[in-house]
Amino acid sequence: MTREDPLRNFRYRLEIDQIQQAGFAEVAIGDLSNEPIEYREGDEVTTVRKLNGLTKYANVTLKWGVTSSSEVADWHQLVVDGATPLDEARRNVVIRLQDEAGQDKAAWELTKAWPCKYDPTDLNGKGNEVAIDTLELCNEGIKRIQ
């Protein structure tokens, strides 16, 4: 039987509806959780039953080096302006993890994602780092699709 090595976390790409951002330096996928509901009826044994409750999807954080492209910041501005319904700012986002040959091997899909926090880079005249912007995406679902 052939052994399959784990994929490395530094080869990935994003697909965001209608946005052609070249690349991202970091993508932090938040956790997914189901809140248990404890339930017990009076005539049952003293053990509490646990039922599944609300499913929560944490925000996803994107970081990228500032370039002349403002597409991602413009996406956030759609939400800030409130000129369009939120549904028009929602996008499907697919995060694709690749092997060393650049082939897609695993993927996660965010549904109805929209930017809820934008943190522009800090500037420092004595610094020597790349300017990094950060965007947090709220979403209504994260699902492993590959």
Image: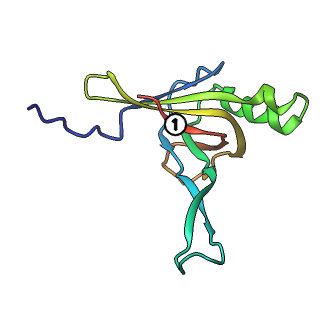
Picture quadrant of residue 74: top right
Q: Looking at this view, is 126 or 94 the one in front?
A: 94
Q: Looking at this view, is 3 or 7 the one in front?
A: 3
The C terminus lies in quadrant: top left
Query: Residue 102 location, x and y as percent?
Result: 31, 22
Residue at which label 1 appears? 143
* In this picture, residue 113 sits left or right of residue 131: right
Query: Residue 104 location, x and y as percent?
Result: 36, 23
Q: Is residue 129 above or below residue 51?
A: above
What residue is rendered at 80% in x and 29% in y?
A: 87
Q: Looking at this view, is 127 or 138 the one in front?
A: 138
What residue is rendered at 62% in x and 51% in y?
A: 56
Q: Looking at this view, is 68 or 15 the one in front?
A: 15
Can you name the residue that lies furthest to the left here? Answer: 1
> How many numbered dots are placed on residues in this image?
1
* In this picture, residue 31 sits left or right of residue 3: right
The N terminus lies in quadrant: top left
* In this picture, residue 137 sits left or right of residue 64: right
What residue is rendered at 81% in x and 36% in y?
A: 79
Q: Is residue 19 above or below residue 36?
A: above
**Residue type beneath disc 1:** Lys
Can you name the residue that lies furthest to the front here? Answer: 43
Disc 1 crowd rating (10 Å Cα; few below 14, some 14-19, many 20+) is few
Q: Secondary structure at mark 1?
A: strand
Q: Is residue 34 above or below residue 100?
A: below
* In this picture, residue 63 sits left or right of residue 102: right
Query: Residue 78 location, x and y as percent?
Result: 81, 31
Can you name the residue that lies furthest to the right here? Answer: 83
Query: Residue 23 location, x and y as percent?
Result: 50, 29
